[in-house]
Amino acid sequence: MAETILEVRNLHKSFGGVQAIRDLSFSVSAGEVMGLIGPNGSGKSTTVNSLAGLFSATSGQIVLGGEEIQHLPEYPRVAKGLTRTFQTASVFPEFTVREQVRLGSNTTLKSNPLASVFRLGGSSDEEKRVEARIEDILHLTDLHRIADKKVSTISSGEQRFLMIATALAADPKLILLDEPAAGLISHERKTLSELIKLIRSRGIAVLVIEHHMALIMEVCDRIVVLNFGSKIAEGTPTEIRSNKAVIDAYLGEAA
Ligand SMILES: Nc1ncnc2c1ncn2[C@@H]1O[C@H](COP(=O)(O)OP(=O)(O)OP(=O)(O)O)[C@@H](O)[C@H]1O
């Protein structure tokens, strides 16, 4: 059986009087793609932000690779193997694509991160390993064709793939994808599906929030459904598609 990478136990998050997440529990294994879906305001972003450490959970445990991380700020969580993308592309326009991806690898380096981005230092074994990984990720994400272009000159779709490549450069055990298909056109969504499957094939756990149901149903092994901050269902795409509570709350008859 695949190793459990993430365990969310009885997570609660309140903003003043608003209970954004209520008693949420689920787990994700190595090489598993878990979807997180639900209507607007159901708590998906709050869950991702709590897992990534942008918000501190009100109560509950977040266990990554057997270790509780809910007390840690964002950056140490990345260093422990939990990385994320954002709903909007947040990139450095003056960097080349390769430099931006290299920036994502900083948490894996013991040497000066800025020196590594611009390759100022010598070429230690560590740096050579990182460079090889960066080239591998550029190929995996099909960004190698444009690796030397400035980020400001690439398309918005390419920027979204760059965000995933940057997150992968941190060598994650778990990657959180926050609406990765937003703004992508049809053939880019197909490439995204293929990329998510490739990430899974490398044994990385994936948690994906997405409103694009065709993509979710295609790539996910299991899906957690939220409504008003609570989990109302968990199961395979086939189970979720025919779940009455999910149809009533979110999918509608069209699913
Ligand atoms: N920083 C915040 N301060 C106060 N309330 C918040 C904050 N962030 C989220 N909320 C509230 O928490 C609830 C869950 O919001 P959240 O953004 O997590 O939902 P979502 O499922 O991601 O929605 P969407 O699909 O629209 O992105 C909502 O009632 C929202 O208004």
Image (tube, rainbow, N blue to C red):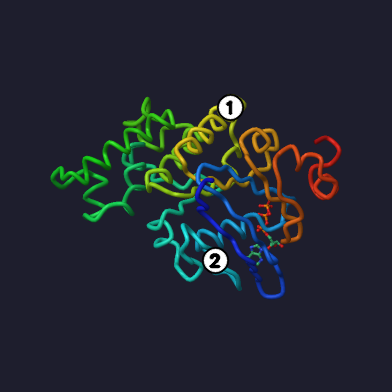
Q: Secondary structure at mark 2?
A: loop
The quarter of the picture where residue 214 lies is top right
Rendering coords of residue 209 (x, y %) = 62, 47
Query: Is 56 situated above or below 206?
Result: below
Q: Residue at x 27, y 52 (%)?
A: 109
Q: Residue at x 65, y 34 (%)?
A: 215
Number of marks: 2
The single residue placed furthest to the left in the displayed view is 122
Task: Tell me if 81 is positioned left or right of 14 in this view.
Answer: left
Q: Nearer the viewer, residue 187 or 35?
A: 35
Q: Which label was assigned to residue 55?
A: 2
Query: Within 10 angstroms of label 1, few (less than 14), some, or many (20 or more) residues?
Result: few
Rendering coords of residue 17 (x, y %) = 71, 74
Q: Secondary structure at mark 1?
A: helix
The amino acid marked with disc number 2 is Phe
The quarter of the picture where residue 24 lies is bottom right
Along the polypeptide, which appears first: circle 2 or circle 1? 2
The single residue placed furthest to the bottom in the displayed view is 16
The single residue placed furthest to the front in the displayed view is 1
Pick the quarter of the image with the C terminus: top right
**Whether the residue under disc 2 has CB within 8 Å of ligand 1:** yes
Residue that label 1 marks: 190
The amino acid marked with disc number 1 is Lys
Q: Residue at x 48, y 71 (%)?
A: 71
> Which quadrant of the render holds ligand 1?
bottom right
**Whether the residue under disc 1 has CB within 8 Å of ligand 1:** no
Rendering coords of residue 82 (x, y %) = 46, 54
Q: Nearer the viewer, residue 95 or 129?
A: 129
The quarter of the picture where residue 95 lies is top left
Rendering coords of residue 184 (x, y %) = 58, 33
Give the CA separation, mark 2 to mark 1: 32 Å
